[in-house]
Image (spheres, rainbow, N blue to C red):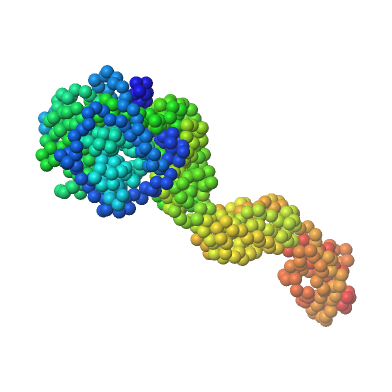
Amino acid sequence: MRLLLALVILSTATARAPSETPSIPGNVATTGDRPSARQAEGRGEGLPDRRDFPLDPSRYLPMPLPDPRARPASPPGESRAVSYDMRTGQEVQWQVPAPTGLDAARVEGWPGRESPREFGEGVPEVRNFTDLELVNDPELFPWRVNVKVFMQFGSSYYVGSGVLVDPYHVLTAGHCVFDHGGTDDWADDITVVPAYENGSQPFGNAGAVSLHSWTGWTQDGSYDHDMGVIDLDRPIGALTGWHGYGYNNSNSFFTGNTFHNPGYPAASPYNGQYMYYWYGDFDLAGTYQLTFFKTAYGGQSGSGAYHLSDDQRTVYAVLSNGWSLWTNDVRITESKFSHIGGFIAEDTPAAYDLIAMETNIAPSSVTAGNALISMDYLVHNYSSASWSGSVPVTVYLSTNNDISPADTPIQDHSFSWSFGPMSSVRVTVSTPPAIPIATPSGSYYVGIILGVSDANAANNESDGQEASYVWVNGGPDLMVQNPGTAPSTIIAGTSTIASCTVRNQGGNSAGASILRYYLSSNTTYDAGDAYLGYDSVGSLPGGGTSSQSETLAIPAGTAGGTWYLLFHADAESQVSELNESNNVTALAVTVQPENIPPDAITDLAATGAAPDLLLSWSAPWDNVGVVGYWVYHHASLHDFGTPLVYLSGASTLSYSVPNACGDPASNHFYDVRARDAAGNVAASSNWVGEFDFSVDP
């Protein structure tokens, strides 16, 4: 037992080093749980889910402050400690430890992640206990170390008080864990809430998995041993800090020093919704109980009385019983001190054990596809071992608060830290993860999993209260995937078959929309791009796709070179999307200029009489289509000719040449040349004209 006690003192003493906040390159910056060995076997299995506790606070009555006059006298000597496993119902007794010969000893506590705050602790020493004073900021240290205790014994529900003396352990009264006069049995359920105030649970809550007391209470019902310890399913003290505990064999230590006692009075005129505090010297000190002449109230049972010395708050007793004129606290004796150390040591692994805790994110509502504004979490080493190294971390998005590898991973990062025994680090993610755009609207949780091989892998996931709730505003988001053309090299004026897949990468359904195709000189759509065609796209569920294809004609006058075929999803803005800037996908295509002229006209004919001459012909073939005709005039058979007129339109197949007949001084000849959409002009047609005042066809 002496070796065990030394280990307890060593592990908690090193835990006093405050959490730091270094800057770590990359994704995270840091600042700072482990279940017992029994948690690896399923700590808390079969016990109530307490994340919404208490569901009905009004049914919890003040635990009556016991009247010690109704109980038997204490049996002589120390009693054995007894432990009760709430899952299995197994009860185990501990031997009474041998005396150490020390008159006093203490285990140090840890104030948590901020400097201690004083409230009444800095005043001059007072002789008598003060009146109860309201604690205005129970979330601050040292007040947050104190807990409101919710108990169930059969069909009876009570509230009491307690104090954290370790991340996993609460010191309280024996009658808060084992009932005498009612069920005469252990509690069926206990939940503790640090810094409770009028329904608020700023650090959440933790449930009991094992209970401890002493046979002097559980068997004999003696108030000399009315003390209990609660083992928790969650190391909530890593978030709040905890007080030390100790013993002192000198009675004058208690009658000559100031002790501080916060708790939750719940009997009239108090209602148990607020923390109150009083302090002073004890008036009487006995072997097992300490007395002060003030009246306590139901609900204060189990509240710790601590002494402040050298910036250390050490609990030496718990409020137990009383009468209208006085109140008794049960004193931590040397053997009880050793037993409490044994309860804690039994739950403390010798190998390092990192616990993922208290994931915090902002905002609490985010649109899918957007990143969180902030994220941080706590990692606690609940063990007697030190450890240094890099910790891989995966962030998950889950539909419930049971974080597992089956959930959606949204970020991987790592941080490095040197953990001492019972120490923590607060990690701030400098680049918070984004919520996947495919996430449908609904309620989710963000949590982490630590990628380390430590003493207990089961607590590497930030499950339950350690996960952070977020509402995701989902929506549709249309985009184009797998664009293609056949052929990919296109002659201006000819067609290609464009194909693609329209995908709704959002989590919510998208209504019907229009896909448009454009030809552009760059990858960005603007109003000057050439419209080529469209397809209708039906409604798509989240993650749904629709295959599209369309025959598109490249304008005949398009210059040769690299162009871009633009696929524009939701081109008419029929769908309200999560991201309106990702609807256009560009595909580079090669356009070759069209350089094949139309066929030469071979049936040009001339008819008419002076003074006009009527030319007529048939439309020739062209690969991109004729768009007009040039009429050429020749002054002689050896003249190359000059353009007389351009006739627009493929269907313009005749022209009347004015004043072309009856000129005795000269002869006149004509030919017609077709022009296509690419600007190519055909060779000369057959010639027709006027010879010696007559028409020669």
Quick one: quadrant of the C terminus?
bottom right
Say which quarter of the image contains residue 82.
Answer: top left
Callout count: 0
Q: Position of residue 671 (x, y in %)?
A: 83, 69
Eyeballing the image, is 168 above or below 503? above
| Residue at screen point 18% across, 34% down | 73
Q: Position of residue 401 (x, y in %)?
A: 44, 47
| Residue at screen point 22% across, 24% down | 248
Q: Is residue 185 left or right of residue 376?
A: left
Eyeballing the image, is 528 above or below 48? below
Residue 148 in view (yes/no): no
| Residue at screen point 13% across, 37% down | 326
Q: Position of residue 429 (x, y in %)?
A: 44, 38
| Residue at screen point 32% across, 42% down | 186
Quick one: quadrant of the N terminus?
top left
Residue 152 in view (yes/no): yes
Eyeballing the image, is 585 above or below 233? below
Q: Nearer the viewer, residue 664 or 346?
A: 346
Q: Is residue 159 left or right of residue 594?
A: left
Q: Nearer the viewer, residue 94 or 205?
A: 94
Eyeballing the image, is 278 above or below 499? above
Q: Position of residue 597 (x, y in %)?
A: 80, 61
